[in-house]
Image: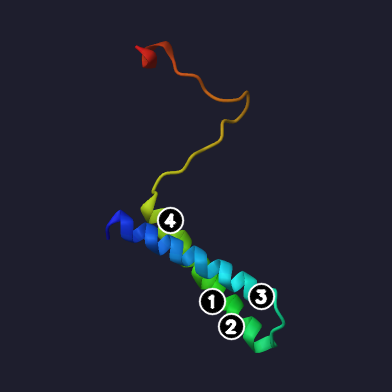
Amino acid sequence: MMIDEKLARLRTHGNNIGRYRRLLSTQLTDCEREFIEKRLSEERSAMESLAASTFPFTLQTPARGGYATPTAEAVR
């Protein structure tokens, strides 16, 4: 799958998540609420999975003392 397709799917999942959140803030029957909560969970899971495969790296925060600076060897 091309990166453009993955990004489009991520946007779609994000839009669906927003839609389900808005729906949950309305008056719903217990059955409707249960269905929407299930769909919201499925959308979040699909989005997390797709994001992990699209961007397979993670950024870590420095432990303490701010940001790391490049070594003299790395600057040369």
Sequence-wise, the earlier of marks 2 and 4 is 2
Q: CA gap, disc 2 to disc 4?
A: 24 Å
Quarter assignment of residue 50: bottom left
Say which amino acid is labelled 2.
Phe
> Which structural element holds mark 1?
helix
Q: Depth check: give the residue in front, 60 or 2.
A: 2
**Residue drawn at x 62%, y 27% as measured from the top left:** 64
Other residues around mark 1 within 10 Å, as few (<14) / some (14–19) / many (≥20): some
**Residue drawn at x 52%, y 37% as measured from the top left:** 60
Say which amino acid is labelled 1.
Arg
Disc 3 vs disc 4: Cβ atoms closer than 8 Å? no
**Residue drawn at x 62%, y 70% as measured from the top left:** 21
Sequence-wise, the earlier of marks 3 and 4 is 3
Other residues around mark 3 within 10 Å, as few (<14) / some (14–19) / many (≥20): some
The residue beneath circle 4 is: 51
The residue beneath circle 1 is: 39
Say which amino acid is labelled 3.
Leu
Q: CA gap, disc 1 to disc 3?
A: 11 Å
Say which amino acid is labelled 4.
Ala
Disc 1 vs disc 2: Cβ atoms closer than 8 Å? yes
Q: CA gap, disc 3 to disc 4?
A: 24 Å
> Which structural element holds mark 4?
helix
Quarter assignment of residue 67: top right
Left or right: residue 42 versus residue 37 is left
Image quarter in which the C terminus is found: top left
The residue beneath circle 2 is: 35
- Tell me: residue 63, above or below residue 23: above
The residue beneath circle 3 is: 24
